[in-house]
């Protein structure tokens, strides 16, 4: 049980949400000498409190035990971290800087100022100095190598991605291991198990109405307020508070299709480091990579494919889970009176689904080129494939009713920029016409990042926090 807190709190700065954007922002504010509160809806748990990707971790660190739905045709099942550190605690920490062409697109479409690789470079570097990134030392695990070998045999380029990970200690460089300790050292206070319900502007300050797990109702009063609850919960909080201009209208995803490959020799060994190979040469149409392939994850992915699922008990060591993802899916976040959770909906352009399905077929070819004996697309009604020739039996188009789309990357629900027709904030995260109120998370992205978004979120939060501090949050 969390410790009770006073029913009224006062701070110079309050940051709601402790994921990558919120933790970076809160740290810089505290180090600048401002009294800063970092508020988190979920629990404050050590990084190693439970095994990563275990059922216990899913129950304690994910929102709704990892099952949240964006309704559509097809729907998307997505995950959100709900603990101190947010999504950084539950993801694999694969790390990329924002591709330059993505920054150029955002700067052009939404008129975002100072959003170039050169302008962001010092902010990436500053974040990387605290949340260190590293290449996997030595030989990648077989699960990962197989994808790289399949790509090479087809003449495709594959990379071994860096991770936010300390390979010497075997610890992920999540927020609870990096920025949150730095924030506390600067005198900042973390309050976990407290859900912000509404915000409002009173007498030149921001007032947050919240509910703490032990104390009950709590009011926070702050001169400056950063909302960093994530791309779904941030627009939900703002809309509950009557702030709606371009809020929650442009949610985007990186939806995934998955396939399980069965190889002739073990590829999936207990204690292996996480796989790191990715095929990025086809981006932005689609990207290909390796997933965590524990028996539990295999079983979840194969829920609609009983013949391959039945083999897990005997053959899990020879099975690997792989994915293809792109930027399909245009969503909205809405709140309903009396409902605790927001309603998320999504629609898909056929051309984007076609690209994703083409990506799945590229993935299957790569797996057979890597020596797979069989490949099972993880969708109902799809037969197990035993050769490249069997791909002729695949449906011509991705059936919308059976497409089991999942996502771990959600963003762009409150985009930044100077074009008020499209954006919710200015180029620096300041919500239009709301003095002292800013957004500091993946909501600010203007579209899919294509690459893993955590590096982008951290760097832009760093940039925007320094901008706010320099202007004394004006």
Image (cartoon, rainbow, N blue to C red):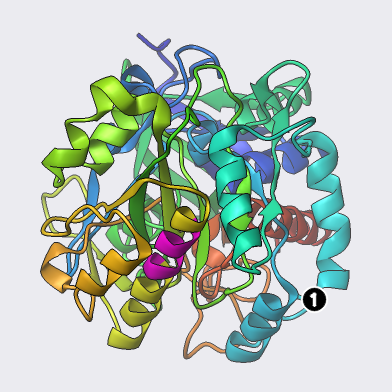
Please name the residue shown 31% across and 63% down the image. Answer: 239
What residue did someone put label 1 on?
Answer: 116
Q: Is residue 419 left or right of residue 40?
A: right
Q: Nearer the viewer, residue 71 or 3?
A: 71
Give the x, y percent position of residue 349: 30, 84
Give the x, y percent position of residue 266: 47, 27
Give the x, y percent position of residue 313: 25, 21
Q: Is residue 42 visible?
A: no
Tell me, yes or no, whether the highlighted magenta stretch contains residue 439.
no
Please name the residue shown 61% across and 80% down the image. Answer: 417
Q: Is residue 155 visible?
A: yes
Please name the residue shown 62% across and 81% down the image. Answer: 106
Check the image and report above or below for 193 versus 431: above
Q: Nearer the viewer, residue 371 or 206?
A: 371
Image quarter (top left, top right, bottom left or bottom right) of the C terminus: bottom right
Check the image and report above or below for 303 versus 405: above
Give the x, y percent position of residue 177: 67, 24
Please name the residue shown 20% across and 35% down the image. Answer: 309
Crowdedness near tag 1: few (<14), some (14–19) or many (≥20) residues, C-alpha within 10 Å: some
Magenta segment, which residues?
360-366
């Amino acid at each position: 049980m969390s410790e009770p807190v006073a029913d009224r709190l006062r701070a110079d700065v309050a940051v709601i949400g402790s994921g990558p954007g919120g933790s970076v922002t809160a740290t810089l504010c505290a180090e600048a000498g401002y009294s800063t509160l970092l508020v988190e809806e979920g629990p404050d748990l050590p990084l190693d409190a439970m095994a990563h990707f275990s059922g216990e971790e899913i129950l304690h660190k994910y929102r709704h035990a990892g099952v949240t739905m964006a309704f559509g045709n097809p729907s998307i099942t997505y995950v959100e971290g709900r603990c101190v550190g947010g999504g950084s605690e539950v993801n694999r920490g694969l790390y990329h800087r924002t591709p330059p062409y993505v920054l150029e697109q955002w700067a052009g479409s939404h008129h975002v100022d100072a959003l170039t690789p050169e302008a962001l470079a010092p902010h990436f570097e500053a974040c990387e100095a605290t949340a260190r990134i590293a290449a996997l030392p030595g030989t990648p695990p077989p699960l990962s190598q197989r994808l790289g070998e399949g790509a090479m045999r087809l003449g495709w380029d594959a990379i071994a991605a860096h991770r936010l990970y300390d390979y010497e200690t075997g610890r992920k460089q999540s927020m609870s291991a990096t920025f949150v300790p730095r924030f506390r050292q600067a005198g900042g206070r973390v309050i976990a198990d407290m859900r912000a319900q509404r915000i409002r502007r009173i007498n030149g300050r921001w007032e947050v109405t919240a509910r703490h797990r032990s104390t009950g109702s709590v009011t926070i009063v702050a001169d400056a307020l950063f909302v960093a609850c994530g791309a779904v919960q941030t627009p939900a909080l703002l809309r509950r508070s009557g702030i709606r201009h371009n809020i929650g209208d442009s949610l985007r995803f990186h939806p995934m299709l998955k396939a399980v490959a069965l190889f002739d020799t073990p590829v999936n060994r207990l204690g292996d480091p996480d796989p790191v190979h990715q095929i990025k040469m086809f981006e932005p149409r689609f990207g290909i990579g390796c997933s965590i392939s524990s028996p539990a994850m295999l079983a979840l992915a194969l829920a609609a494919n009983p013949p391959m699922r039945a083999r897990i008990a005997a053959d899990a060591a020879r099975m690997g889970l792989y994915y293809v993802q792109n930027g399909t899916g245009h969503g909205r976040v809405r709140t309903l009176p009396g409902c605790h959770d927001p309603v998320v909906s999504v629609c898909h352009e056929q051309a984007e689904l076609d690209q994703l399905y083409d990506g799945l077929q590229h993935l299957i070819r790569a797996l057979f080129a890597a020596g797979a004996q069989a490949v099972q697309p993880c969708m109902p009604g799809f037969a197990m494939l035993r050769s490249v020739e069997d791909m002729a039996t695949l449906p011509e188009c991705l059936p919308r009713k059976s497409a089991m789309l999942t996502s771990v990357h959600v963003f762009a629900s409150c985009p930044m920029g100077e074009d008020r027709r499209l954006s919710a904030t200015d180029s620096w995260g300041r919500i239009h016409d709301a003095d002292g109120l800013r957004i500091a998370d993946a909501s600010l992205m203007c579209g899919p990042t294509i690459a893993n978004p955590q590096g982008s979120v951290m760097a832009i939060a760093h940039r925007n926090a320094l901008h706010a501090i320099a202007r004394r949050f004006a």
